[in-house]
Image (tube, rainbow, N blue to C red):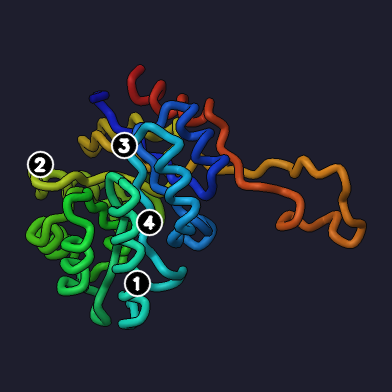
Amino acid sequence: MPAFIIEIATSDFETTQSAVDGGADRIELCANLNEGGTTPSKGMIEQCRNSFNLPIFPIIRPRGGDFLYTEDEFQLMLMDTRFCKQVGCEGVVIGMLDIDGHIDLKRTAALINAAYPLEITFHRAFDRCKDPFKALEDLIKIGCQRILTSGQQPGAPEGKEMIRNLITEADSRIVIMPGSGVRKDNIKMLAEHTGAVEFHSSVRGKIKSRMNFIHPAFTSSAESYSNNFIDPADVGALREALEN
C-alpha cells in the first residue's frame, strides 16, 4: 500500500479511465459533480467496476442540494447501496443529516448495515454538521471507516486547522480525508500541516467536443459542445507533489 492514498472524484466513464491512467488509488464515482456529486447510473457503476482494477466507491446521493432526505429518498439510497454491494464495489460514499444539523444516526446506520462489508466514507455533509466533534464520535460509533471533509470551510486549505484537530481527535480510529480544493500546489502543505495520509481531489476540467458538426444555434453552448475532462498528468502531479 502506498504511503499516501489519492482518491479522485470522477463524473463518467472517460474521466474514470483518465484517473486510473494517472495513477489514482481509489475512485469516488459520481454523476453531476457540478452539484457536488449524485448517484451514477447502475450501468455506469457496473461498467466501471468491471473495467478497472482499483477500489470503486460510488456516491449514494439521490439529488443535489441539502442532506435532509425524505423517506422515499432514503429508500432509493438503500436500493442503490445494495446494488453497489451486489456488483462488487469496495465501498460507498454516503451522508445524511437531521433537521437540526446532526448526523441522521438511525438511517446512516441502516445504510452502513445494508452495505456491509463494504467500506463507508461519510462525505462533506459532515462539513454542514453543527458539532463536528460530536459527529466524529457518532460516525466512529456506527462503523464508518472514513470522513471526507474540508474542515467545515469551503475548501480544505481554509479548513486545515479543523482537519488537523479532527485527525488528532480521531486518533487513528477513523480516517480523516481532506477534500475540496486539494491541488498539486497545496497537497504537500496539507499533508505536513494536518498529518493526513488520504486525499480527495477532482482535478476536473473541460475539453472541446470531438463533433465535426456544430449546430449554428448552439455554437456558444458549453453544455452542448464540451465534455468533462481529467488529464492523467494532473493526477500523477498530485502524487509527485506529495512524495517529493
Q: Amino acid at mark 2?
A: Ser
On residue 173, which mark appears?
A: none
Q: Which residue is mark 2?
A: 172
Q: Is residue 213 above or below residue 186?
A: below
Residue 25 drawn at (x, y percent): 35, 32
Q: Is residue 62 left or right of residue 152?
A: right
Q: Is residue 197 above or below residue 202?
A: above
Expressed as whole percent of the image width and height from the top left, the position of residue 105 reads 16, 71
Alpha carbon separation for disc pair 4 and 3:
24 Å
Which corner quadrant of the image does residue 37 belong to? bottom left
Q: Which mark is residue 59?
A: 4
Residues marked 4 and 3 touching at CB (< 8 Å) = no
- SS for callout 1: loop
Q: Quadrant of the N terminus?
A: top left
Secondary element at tag 3: helix
Residue shown at 39% from the left, 25% from the top: 239
Closer to us: 196 or 33: 33
Q: Residue at x 33, y 67 (%)?
A: 79
**Disc 3 from disc 2: Cα separation:** 17 Å
Amino acid beneath label 3: Leu
Q: Identify the residue under disc 3.
A: 190
